[in-house]
Every structure is written in C-alpha cells, then in structure tokens.
Amino acid sequence: MRSCAPIDRRGLIAAVGALLLTAACAPRAQPSLIGGPFQLTDQNGRRVDERILRGKWTAVFFGYTFCPDVCPTTLTNLGQASALLGSRARDFQVVFISVDPARDTPAQLKSYLSSPAFPTGAMGLTGTPAQVAAAAAAYRVYYKRAGSGPDYSVDHTAIVYLMDPKGRFSQPVDDAAAPAQIARQIAGAMN
C-alpha cells in the first residue's frame, strides 16, 4: 500500500499559525507570505497562472492523483462542503495542484477530478517539475518522492489554503473537519 503521509500536522499547524500571526501583526501593505505567481497547465491542457484565483474564493490544495488517502478524503470533504454552501458555492472554487508532475498529466487530472464525490468544476493543475516546484515554493508546500518504481508515493504538505477573490491568502481550512465545519469556515471568510 502506498503512503501519502503528510508532514507532522502539529508542527505544520504551528508553522502556519506563526505565519498567520506574523501576517496579522504586519502592516496591511505587506504582501502575504503564502501564495504568489505560478505558471501551470490545467486538466484541459490550457496554460494558466495565478489569475485563475481572482473573482472567486478558492481552496488551493496540493496533492497527487495516486494518493491513497489524504488527497481523495480532502477533495471529498471539499465537495460536500461546497454543496453545503448553497447559492454561495457559485463564488467558490477548488484548485488541486499536483506535486507529482511525472504521473499527473492533464488527462490524468481530468479523469481523477471527474469523480462525483469531488467538487464540481474543480480545476487540476500540473506542469514541469520546475513549474510545480515554483508553485509549491510560493505556497510554502513541502513535497518529496518516497520510494521507487511505478508505485512510489509522494510525501506532501496537506493544508487547504483559502484564497480571497483577489487571489490573496485568507486562512487555512481545517481539512480534517467535517464538511459542515469546512463550509462554515469558508462562509465565515466570505462574510
């Protein structure tokens, strides 16, 4: 069985908390330490950049399609949370960025995200290893290939980043929470 072991949750939560505290205490003009420019390819083969985050609240999640547990569970929870947003769901989108560019082609992402359990209209992004590394660095995401052969896994940060309609980091979403709690977190940020 492959493992999709995220890095230590407590340490990661503490690090994100420190980033948030730093951002909260910083002058308003200072840009967020999370997020930034990227150039990737979506599941339809179109080249996209960070402008796809503008105009809607966006949950950005890094993972990979061969992940056996964390990624499908998180996407399923986001799909259920999105449905619970009701009419506000039209102002919300999910962006799934692959940390496995060797296997996650646009076609693979399209097939994976077609699951009815996942958020309707979720956008999958991939790119060259350098493009994926640049996007991961912008979001402070850790990832590393684990194992060898075709069944390798990828250890990665398992945080959902909620970005505001201007493409700026708003807050982390508790991906381990029940879908109703996730929906409340997103709706609260929208207010």
Image (tube, rainbow, N blue to C red):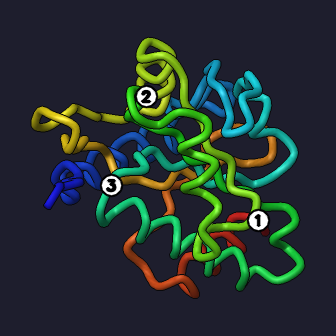
Label 1–label 3 contact, CB within 8 A: no
Classify residue 179 by image quadrant: bottom right
Which residue is rendered at x = 58% and y = 87% of the image? 180
Label 1 environment density (alpha carbons within 10 Å; few <14, some 14–19, many ≥20): some
Quadrant for the C terminus, please. bottom right
Q: Position of residue 100 (x, y in %)?
A: 38, 34
Q: Amino acid at mark 1?
A: Met
- Residue 67's label in the rendered image is 3
Residue that numbered label 1 is attached to:
190
Q: Amino acid at mark 2?
A: Pro
Residue 18 against residue 137 in the figure, above or below? below
Q: Secondary structure at mark 1?
A: helix
How far, Cα to Cα, is label 1 from label 2? 32 Å
What is the quadrant of the N terminus in the image?
A: bottom left
Closest to the observer, 105 or 56: 105
- Residue depicted at 74% across the width and 25% down the height: 48
Name the residue that disc number 2 marks: 101
Confirm whether residue 121 shows in the render.
yes
Q: Amino acid at mark 3?
A: Cys
Residue shown at the point (64%, 18%) measured from the top left = 39
Instruction: Evaluate if marks 3 and 2 touch, with contact meaning CB atoms under 8 Å apart.
Output: no
Q: Earlier in the sequence, mark 1 or mark 2?
A: 2
- The answer to whether residue 89 is left or right of residue 137 is right
The front one of 169 and 119 is: 119
Q: Marks 3 and 2, Cα distance to the nearest angstrom?
A: 13 Å
Q: Along the polypeptide, which appears first: circle 3 or circle 2?
A: 3
Q: Secondary structure at mark 3?
A: loop
In the displayed structure, 80 sits above or below 15; it is below
In the displayed structure, 51 sits above or below 114; it is: above
